[in-house]
Image (cartoon, rainbow, N blue to C red):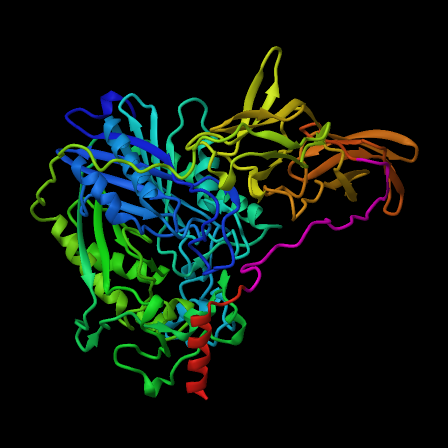
Amino acid sequence: MTGADSVPGSDLRAGVARRDITPANGDQFFGYARPDKTAEGVSLRLFARALVLEFDGNRIALVSADLGAPKVRERVLERVRPLGFDENTLLFACTHTHAGPGDMGDWVAAQVGDAVAAAADRARPAVAGWGTATVEDANRSRSVEAHLANHNQDHQPGTATPDLDPEGPDHTRDTTLRLLRVETADGDPVAAWTHFPVHPTAYTPHNTTYSADCSGVAVRRFAAEFDGDTPLAMHTNGPLGDVIPVYDDHNMHAVADRTGKRMAQGMREAWDDAAGDLTGDVPVAGRATTVTYDGQEVAPGKRVADEAAFGLPFFGGGENGPSLFFDAGLQGLRLPAEKADPVHGRKLVAGADGPWSWPPAVPAQAIRVGDRLLLAYGGEPTVETGRRVCAAAAAAAPDGVEDLAVVGVANGYRGYFTTPEEYDQQHYEGGHTVFGKYTSLAMENALVDLTADLSGEETEKVPPAGTGPESPAAPVGQSGTEPTITDDVPETVERMETVTVGWEGGPAGQDRPVGEPFVVLEREEEDSWEEVATDLDIGFVWREREDGRYSARYDVPPALPTGIYRLRVRTAGGTVASSSVEVVPSTGLRVRGVRLEPKAEQSTVAVVAQNPPPDPDRSLRTRPQRPTGGTVTLVVDGTAREATWDGTAEAWTVTVDGVAAGDEATVPAGGLVDGHGNRSGAETALTVGEVAGVEWPPHIGSGGERPPAPADLRERYEAVLDLLE
């Protein structure tokens, strides 16, 4: 039940805000350790999103930022402490996009802090409730053999499959999507805080644009389903350590779009699932600590390390982020069981100092939101690690808590957290678990203690005490010269093609507006131009080709209304528009054949077709292989008949007397018209009973090209190989 009648005697309040955190061009990326790659543009803008919840005098802030890791947490805390937030009550989670900036400076911290401040300022009476959904085909395990070690199985890397898991193949991953639905007391949508585990690595190591990846697509596609008021959608990652996207599309843009689309569908299901449980009785509280690794015993006879140490498989990278050495057989390279170290297990220690070392301190946090408990990890726990800590903490949870979930890459970053069994397999995840075989047990102990503490006395609240530090100047949004068009649009463009415009402006994207569109698609109406789409959404990418010279590409959707359009560039120095371009229906639909489906004394024929295949070098969206709706003109034995779309048959069907396999048929030029008005091209000759396969570019697969290796990494690798010999 929604509305004011559902919240008698309750004082839940909620507020949301978002801020643009996309820096200027030129920085290296967080992911993949690619010093040879720097950002030269943007595929999907990066944002920090904040949800502030207040109940019974307690207040928490849930932040989701399109960053690889929360490196600026301490600077964010400096900004939000004066507002009454601290380590206990600020959950600073990152989506873990690998296409975010590697260097996150004061401006990013200021933007995150400002999002929290604005969300707190906008808090108003609210109701909230939790929902769940199962999301298929959006993630898979990249380390099945390591996971199976939890079931006392020992397989060489690349030799096992998920169906060997005695609890079923889905046990190798986590398919549960959780969503906190927040509305005003009057029923207006406020926020959709989402939790689902997947590595945002659709953008592969050869990417050169900033992108929020599949997480950014998911929140945008979910929001697009609402008419009128739209909730602020936020994605946070779960136990993502060993789960990656399903790379089943033609390029990295499309993989991000397809994965995000699947996540968005789950978000909508979970949003609807929460509808019946909205309430104003939503207790909130938080506890935090720092886990220090100093060689202590974390269980009888089990100790952790006192300094970070990487294993040899770390230097090969993971399947979805391989290094130069990935193909050298580092996955699973380990000591014999009889030579295992009591702290580092079977790890071949390959790095414990210099730039690859980390301080032995990891943040841990437990946050209560209604009947759910969020356990925040300063790194990447695997799926099974997440299950174990939730099971351990459940026994200590406060009364009324019904579900626990691990939030990965929150408040800090210290690599991976595997189970001891997974660790000794020494896949990439085990090699990147840096404080020894029992690293995860230290975190588990801390999180259980924090959970138990939530049942006790309240911690002292931090009173508001003014405002935070002054914000630094933004690296973008700076004034510049008025832009000029250098490469204009064509006169026409078909749907499912791309249209490009080039212009000259300020260097490094520094004149791009903060939080506002840079490139806009406008449609001509009677006496004006109306905004249709912008680069804040999916379907755009822009790049700086050379100093101050840019190009932007827009992927025209299959259902974009036909008409006259233009692309406008908006900068801090001014605005400039392209010439007009007419968007027309596609003529690229392809008839693939005719199936014969006999029925009694009559026969039904089914026409099969496909959309034009996407261009892997230019297309920016996932595309359905088959068009739907509309009609097909089919000529059999000199007689034209109209076949209509049959959703069950997934084809256009018509009854034809006396037709037989081998008969000739034709679809005249433009004879296939789908539900959006897109058409086929030239006349197509067919043979009844024969259907050609779909012509489509192959899936990209995970990983992409192998990058060069930094000199010190190469030296460590070669030194360890010498020792092994």
* Magenta region, residue range: 681-706
In the image, taking residue 366 as reference, residue 507 lies left or right, namely right
Where 91 sits versus 147, above or below?
above
- Give the residue at x 33% y 60%: 381
Please identify the quarter of the rendering in which residue 526 is found: top right
Q: Estimate the x, y position of residue 193 in percent, counting from the top left.
A: 34, 39
Please identify the quarter of the rendering in which residue 564 is found: top right
Q: Estimate the x, y position of residue 235 in percent, counting from the top left.
A: 38, 43
Asked if the magenta segment contains residue 685, the reply would be: yes
Q: Estimate the x, y position of residue 630 in percent, counting from the top left.
A: 71, 29
The answer to whether any part of residue 710 appears in the image is yes
- Give the residue at x 31% y 61%: 414
Where 284 sits versus 534, above or below?
below
Q: Estimate the x, y position of residue 427 in percent, counting from the top left.
A: 42, 71
For the image shown, how many numbered marks are present on the structure?
0
> Does the magenta stretch mainly form a helix, a strand or a loop?
loop
Q: Nearer the viewer, residue 454 or 584?
A: 584
Please identify the quarter of the rendering in which residue 624 is found: top right
As drawn, which residue projects farthest toward the top? Answer: 527
Q: Nearer the viewer, residue 306 or 285?
A: 306
Asked if the magenta segment contains residue 286, the reply would be: no
Q: Nearer the viewer, residue 642 or 614?
A: 614
In the image, taking residue 560 as reference, residue 325 lies left or right, namely left
- Give the residue at x 40% y 67%: 147
The answer to whether any part of residue 1 appears in the image is no
In the image, taking residue 183 as reference, residue 225 lies left or right, namely right
As drawn, which residue projects farthest toward the right? Answer: 638
- Give the residue at x 51% y 59%: 36
As drawn, which residue projects farthest toward the front? Answer: 481
* The N terminus, quarter of image: top left
Q: Nearer the viewer, residue 615 or 283?
A: 615
